[in-house]
Image (tube, rainbow, N blue to C red):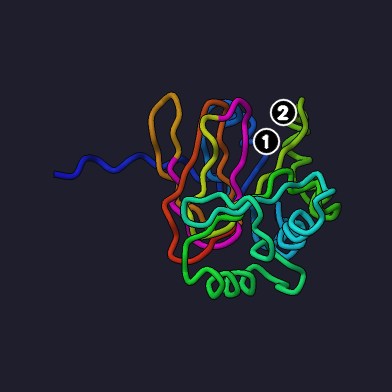
Amino acid sequence: MNGPAPPRPDVLDPLDWQVFARAYWGRRPVVLRPPAPGPVLFDRHEVFEAAVVAAQHRTSAARAELTVGARLLIDPGDLLPQQEDSTFTCYDRRLVRQLDGQPFALTVRTLHAAHPALWARERAFLAGLWDAVGPPPDGARTTLWHGSHGPGGPGPARDAGFVCVLSGRRRLRVTGPAGAAVAVTEPGDLLYLPPGHAWSAPPAPRPVTTV
């Protein structure tokens, strides 16, 4: 017999930073749905360009890693994004051929350091939040997960964070002190995680992009 379905976090639609700060900040997870049309936290093309910079210019503060199957590649070489790929879609097609369909996961840490326009967009989008709750004391950190592996953070985070789904409808499992929940997200949604919460996602039938 199946047990009860896990609860789902609220969906704040449309996103209102003042409402979010009063009802959710530091308290409980929530899915934030920015109004459309309107500003977005991340532009998919800028995210790809930042991934290319991180992959091809090792002097950048951004760091790119690639996992194939269960192996973290020490020297992924041309399996990392290249300028000639132009988009995540083209990059995915190339890797499907080169890896014979093996699942992969691209991770880029400190993504915003690789692309000034991406960082400017991120700051502008979050300005309303920072006006309401104050800027993050240790600065913002941005990590890209892209691939067919189920992405997930390293465990419960010490600080609050957001998960932005750029492609694909996703079911994200959220765990925290109060138990587990499942957030159903659309492209462009943000999942807010208070301190002490973690997230994970099952493998996807095709590569997805999450920041």
Q: Position of residue 140 (x, y in %)?
A: 74, 36
Q: Position of residue 60 (x, y in %)?
A: 83, 48
Q: Magenta stretch: give its range.
A: 157-173
Q: Is residue 128 above or below residue 102?
A: above
Asked whether disc 1 touches disc 2, contact meaning CB atoms under 8 Å apart, the reply is no
The one nearer the camera, 54 or 119, is: 54
Does the segment drawn in magenta span residue 163?
Answer: yes
Quickly name the residue at label 2: 133
SS for tag 2?
A: helix
Q: Position of residue 183 (x, y in %)?
A: 45, 46
Q: Which mark is residue 18?
A: 1
For the point 50% across and 35% down, the residue is: 198
Asked if one can make out residue 210 in the rendered structure from this viewpoint, the answer is no
The amino acid type found where label 1 is placed reads Gln
Q: Nearer the viewer, mark 1 or mark 2?
A: 2
The one nearer the camera, 44 or 103, is: 103
Q: CA distance from mark 1 to mark 2?
A: 9 Å
